């Protein structure tokens, strides 16, 4: 039986890849393992067990349930490389963070239960708007030459509604920053990027102007 110094905390690693092909080829797995190993080494965690799961369905994740149960039994911390390893929607993430298990996400290690929940909500809203915008763009392409002006106005109104809804999901994160003394738009933008909070447009970065615009949007449409 291995013995660890009493100063070391116990950890269980959970890795997930999305297809059987990725499971066989280890695509993405090496990066997850490296991130968790580096975090454990830097923060005094003894990695007791590593659980790898090849995701088969959205809701059925026996590997994750095994990892959570092991953590509860051993009073260990569950460590994942990214938030989307913990769940793909707010409902799943919310259920997991409510359990009596400490959870660390290595690409956002300062996130607590509240901010993990909020980040999951932001990511889900971003996925929803991207999907809807993509469908709208495809529909517009099909209707080329048929009242594009009218369609464009409808799409603009829809984009505004989506942007307003997205701004409201980010607002609790910004309010949480205020309790840490992070209040200027430049500092907020830096912190949002540091904590990997997604922007309304996929792949973009937060800037002082985008934070200011978001805060104005929320203020205009009511808190």
Image: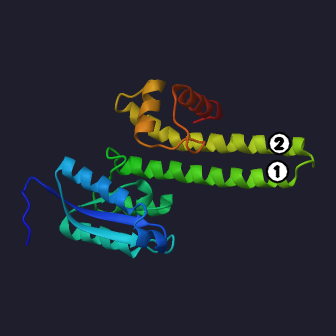
Looking at the image, is 164 positioned above or below residue 17?
above
Q: Position of residue 10 (x, y in %)?
A: 18, 60
Which quarter of the figure is the N terminus placed in? bottom left
Residue named by callout 2: 152
Asked if one can make out residue 22 in the rendered structure from this viewpoint, the answer is: yes
* Residue contact at pointers 2 and 1, CB within 8 angstroms: yes
Residue 47 horizontal side relative to residue 65, left or right: left
Looking at the image, is 206 positioned above or below residue 201?
above
- Please name the residue shown 45% across and 62% down the image: 87
Q: Position of residue 193 (x, y in %)?
A: 45, 37
- Please name the residue shown 47% across and 40% down the image: 172
Q: Which mark is residue 162?
A: none
Residue 99: image quadrant is bottom left
Considering depth in this image, is 158 or 57 the residue closer to the camera?
57
Considering depth in this image, is 126 or 146 the residue closer to the camera?
146
Residue named by callout 1: 140
Which quarter of the figure is the C terminus placed in? top right
Mark 2 lies on a secondary structure that is helix
- Which residue occupies the extreme front position in the image? 25
């Amino acid at each position: 039986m291995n013995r660890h110094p009493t100063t070391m905390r116990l950890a269980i690693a959970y890795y997930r890849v999305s297809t059987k092909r990725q499971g066989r080829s280890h695509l993405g797995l090496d990066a997850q393992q490296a991130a968790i190993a580096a975090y454990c080494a830097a923060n005094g965690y003894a990695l007791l067990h590593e659980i790898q799961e090849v995701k088969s369905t959205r809701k059925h994740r026996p590997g994750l349930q095994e990892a959570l149960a092991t953590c509860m039994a051993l009073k260990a911390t569950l460590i994942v490389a990214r938030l989307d390893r913990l769940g793909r929607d707010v409902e799943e993430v919310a259920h997991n963070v409510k359990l009596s298990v400490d959870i660390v996400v290595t690409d956002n290690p300062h996130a607590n239960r509240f901010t993990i929940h909020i980040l999951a909500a932001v990511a889900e809203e971003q996925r929803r708007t991207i999907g809807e915008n993509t469908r709208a763009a495809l529909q517009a392409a099909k209707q080329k030459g048929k009242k594009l002006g009218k369609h464009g106005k409808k799409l603009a109104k829809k984009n505004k509604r989506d942007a307003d809804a997205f701004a409201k999901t980010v607002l609790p994160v910004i309010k949480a920053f205020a309790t840490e003394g992070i209040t200027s738009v430049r500092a907020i933008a830096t912190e949002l990027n540091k904590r990997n909070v997604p922007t309304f447009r996929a792949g973009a970065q937060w800037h002082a102007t985008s934070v200011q615009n978001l805060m104005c949007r929320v203020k205009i449409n009511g808190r």
